[in-house]
């Protein structure tokens, strides 16, 4: 996995930029329900934990979020795809 952080110019201002490049091995592990978790300190984001995970649908991933978050965590779940 490649991780990078910096800034990028968007219109007339600078925006924070975070990049994750996943290898095929990373993708295989994600498909096997092995999330990628690391400290944001690695990217200059103190007091932050980064979690990358995958799931069959947005609805199934929303259920999986209980593993990672607390009750005060803001979520934005796109419900385009739902469980059959």
Image (cartoon, rainbow, N blue to C red):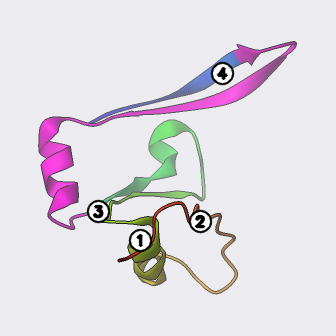
Answer with left or right where residue 25 lies relative to residue 77.
Answer: left
Q: Residues within 10 Å of mark 1 (few under 14, many from 20)?
A: some
Residue 39 on the magenta span: no
Between the residue at mark 1 and the residue at mark 2, the CA separation in whole angstroms equals 9 Å
Q: Residue at x 35, y 77 (%)?
A: 84
Q: Secondary structure at mark 4?
A: strand
On the image, the x and y values in percent for residue 54 come to: 33, 60
The answer to which of 44 and 78 lies nearer the viewer is: 78
Q: Residues within 10 Å of mark 2 (few under 14, many from 20)?
A: few
Answer with left or right where residue 69 lies relative to residue 21.
Answer: right
Q: Circle 2 is placed at which residue position?
A: 77
Circles 1 and 2 in contact, beta carbons < 8 Å? yes
Circles 2 and 4 in contact, beta carbons < 8 Å? no
Q: Which quarter of the figure has residue 14? A: top right
The answer to which of 67 and 77 lies nearer the viewer is: 77
The first of marks 1 and 2 along the sequence is 1
The answer to which of 3 and 32 lies nearer the viewer is: 32
- What's the mark number on residue 61? 1
Q: Which residues are magenta?
A: 9-34
Between the residue at mark 4 and the residue at mark 3, the CA separation in whole angstroms equals 26 Å
On the image, the x and y values in percent for residue 68 come to: 45, 75
Q: Circle 4 is placed at which residue position?
A: 7
The answer to which of 69 and 77 lies nearer the viewer is: 77
Answer with left or right where residue 4 lies relative to residue 74.
Answer: left
Vertical comparison of 41 with 78: above or below = above
Q: Circle 3 is placed at which residue position?
A: 35
């Amino acid at each position: 996995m490649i991780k990078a952080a910096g800034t990028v110019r968007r219109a007339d201002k600078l925006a924070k930029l975070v990049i994750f490049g996943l290898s095929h091995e990373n993708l295989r592990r994600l498909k096997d329900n092995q999330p990628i978790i690391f400290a944001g300190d690695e990217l200059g984001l103190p007091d932050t934990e980064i979690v990358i995970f995958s799931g069959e649908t947005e609805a199934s991933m929303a259920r999986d979020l209980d593993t990672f978050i607390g009750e005060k965590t803001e979520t934005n779940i796109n419900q385009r795809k739902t469980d059959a």
